[in-house]
């Protein structure tokens, strides 16, 4: 480690709230799928800024749009109409199922979840929320109540209104838990932080049926899976209704991460029936619909559409999934199940000690990669990562796993 690195670490140790265990890299620049550290070393980023930099780090169109909007109008309040928010809402609603007709924008995924929970309460008058074990929905006090990962929820148990938790993928358990008191069932189509678990076929359709029968809503958390990541604009598109009339459409969908491509913006969409239940003043926020954030997100959506990145995520993801399957078959003592869709992929690692140090060892070889849920290698790079960069960095990581 350089002297410069050591001195930055020492400075931070004096001032930063120690709640994060960091990897030994100080990042200063990013372009496309590559980032550079303070000592000039380059890394291929297989974390995509945590599933956020959908069009790569500092895409020139995004940088230009942010600069242009910053020079025009950076902030006002939702008391006034603004153009970027309107453009974004229209562009976003045009790529999701028709039944989702309304949008509201906030700054982070957890805030979007809070908004969705409030909306479900308004629409149903009920207070019980059912969610899944190992789920992740954010860290605000509202979102913590429905987060299935106990390590995040339990320390704040006395401050949150706890939901009811059922195993992910278990329709019978869901059917038993959703009752006449239930405001909504909240679920990720693919549990990301929980270990890249894909909802089994028919699960979302079953949840749709059960929630409707109980007068409850279905909230789909697409904060990690949305905006093209799984090879569809929304992951719900992978789940057809039993009668083939289209995909399962929830009452509320939350989005974040890739929506802003790195600019902090998130949001929630809902159906007209749900939208009808709100009253003026029900929700808001100083930065809700911020023009700068909306201009950024509008540009991200435009670039994804123009560059065909949704289809690319599907194709590149399928090839990468194939490589992971082949590796797991060749090294059954090192790797287990391979899961995921598009460019949200996971592979179970058998050696927990090796899994715990993999990210750090990968850094030393010029790759940023994540291990989630303790033993799952997770890949969620930029949707436009050059194929040779993805495959080269992946081979480096697989080499480390093979030992
Ligand atoms: C599925 C899901 N929901 C919600 C969140 C929370 O989003 P944020 O960290 O922007 O609050 C995350 C973040 O990882 C997520 O993956």
Image (cartoon, helix red, strand yellow):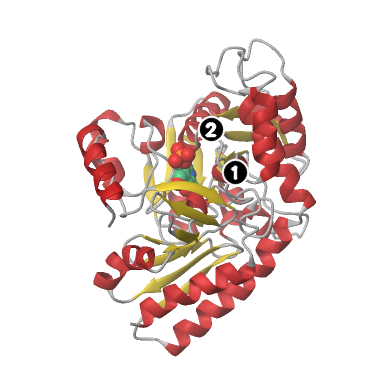
Observer-side mark, 2 or 1, equals 1
Instruction: Residue lying at the far front in this picture: please name it.
Output: 3
Q: Secondary structure at mark 2?
A: helix
Could you say which disc has been placed on residue 79 in the image?
none
Residue under the image location 26 percent in, 38 percent down: 12
- Residue 104, image x and y in percent? 63, 28
- Residues marked 2 and 1 touching at CB (< 8 Å): no
Would residue 365 be seen by someone viewing this image from the given angle?
Answer: yes
Q: Considering the image in quadrants, where does the C terminus appear?
A: bottom left
**Closer to the camera in the image, 208 or 331:** 331
Queried on whether the Cβ of the residue with tag 2 lies below 8 angstroms from ligand 1, the answer reads no
Earlier residue among tags 2 and 1: 2
- Above or below, comparing residue 275 to residue 23 in the picture: above
Residue bearing the label numbered 2: 116
The residue located at (54%, 65%) in the rendering is 200
Q: Residues within 10 Å of mark 2 (few under 14, many from 20)?
A: many
Where residue 44 appears, as percent x and y from the top left, is: 50, 62
Relative to residue 255, is residue 305 depicted above or below?
below
Q: Is residue 145 left or right of residue 249?
A: left
Coordinates of residue 284 in the picture (x, y in percent): 55, 18
Where does label 1 land, which residue? 261
Q: Secondary structure at mark 1?
A: loop
Residue shown at 60%/45% (left/top)?
58
Instruction: Name the quarter where the N terminus is drawn.
Output: bottom left
Bin the neighbour count of mark 1 within 10 Å (Cα to Cα): few under 14, some 14-19, many 20 and up.
many
Quarter of the rendering containing residue 397: bottom left
Horizontal side of 122 relative to 357 (left or right) equals right
Which residue is found at the position 61% from the left and 71% from the top? 388
Q: Where's residue 179, x and y in %?
A: 47, 41
Residue furthest top in the image: 79
Q: Quadrant of residue 377?
A: bottom left
């Amino acid at each position: 480690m350089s002297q410069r690195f050591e001195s930055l670490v020492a400075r931070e140790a004096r001032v930063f709230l120690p709640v994060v265990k960091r990897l030994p890299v100080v990042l200063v620049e990013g372009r496309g799928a590559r980032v550079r550290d303070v000592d000039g070393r380059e890394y291929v980023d297989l974390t995509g800024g945590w599933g956020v930099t959908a069009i790569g780090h500092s895409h020139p169109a995004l940088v230009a749009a942010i600069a242009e909007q910053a020079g025009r109008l950076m902030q006002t309040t939702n008391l006034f109409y603004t153009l970027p928010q309107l453009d974004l809402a229209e562009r976003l609603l045009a790529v999701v199922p028709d039944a989702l007709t309304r949008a509201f924008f906030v700054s982070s995924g957890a805030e979007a979840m809070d908004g969705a929970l409030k909306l479900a309460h308004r629409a149903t008058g009920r207070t019980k929320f059912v969610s899944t074990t190992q789920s992740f929905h954010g860290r605000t006090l509202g979102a913590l109540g429905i987060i299935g990962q106990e390590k995040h929820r339990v320390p704040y148990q006395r401050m949150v209104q706890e939901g009811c938790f059922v195993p992910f993928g278990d329709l019978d358990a869901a059917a038993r838990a959703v009752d006449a008191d239930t405001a909504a069932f909240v679920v990720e189509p693919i549990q990301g932080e929980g270990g890249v678990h894909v909802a089994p076929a028919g699960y979302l359709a079953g949840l749709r049926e059960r929630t409707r029968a109980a007068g409850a809503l279905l909230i789909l958390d697409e904060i990690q899976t949305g905006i093209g990541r799984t090879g569809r604009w929304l992951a719900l598109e992978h789940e057809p209704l039993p009668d083939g009339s289209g995909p399962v459409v929830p009452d509320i969908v939350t989005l974040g991460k890739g929506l802003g491509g790195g600019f902090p913006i998130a949001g929630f969409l809902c159906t007209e029936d749900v939208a009808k239940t709100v009253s003026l003043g029900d929700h808001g926020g100083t930065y809700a619909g911020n023009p700068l954030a909306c201009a950024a997100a509008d540009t991200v959506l435009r670039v994804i559409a123009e560059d065909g990145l949704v289809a690319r995520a599907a194709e590149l993801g399928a090839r990468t999934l194939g490589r992971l399957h082949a590796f797991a078959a060749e090294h059954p003592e090192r790797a287990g199940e391979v899961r995921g869709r598009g460019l949200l992929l996971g592979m179970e690692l058998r050696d927990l000690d090796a899994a715990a140090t993999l990210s750090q060892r990968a850094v030393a070889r010029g790759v940023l990669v994540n291990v989630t849920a303790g033993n799952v290698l997770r890949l969620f790079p930029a949707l436009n990562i050059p194929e040779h960069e993805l495959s080269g960095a992946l081979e480096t990581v697989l080499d480390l796993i093979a030992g």
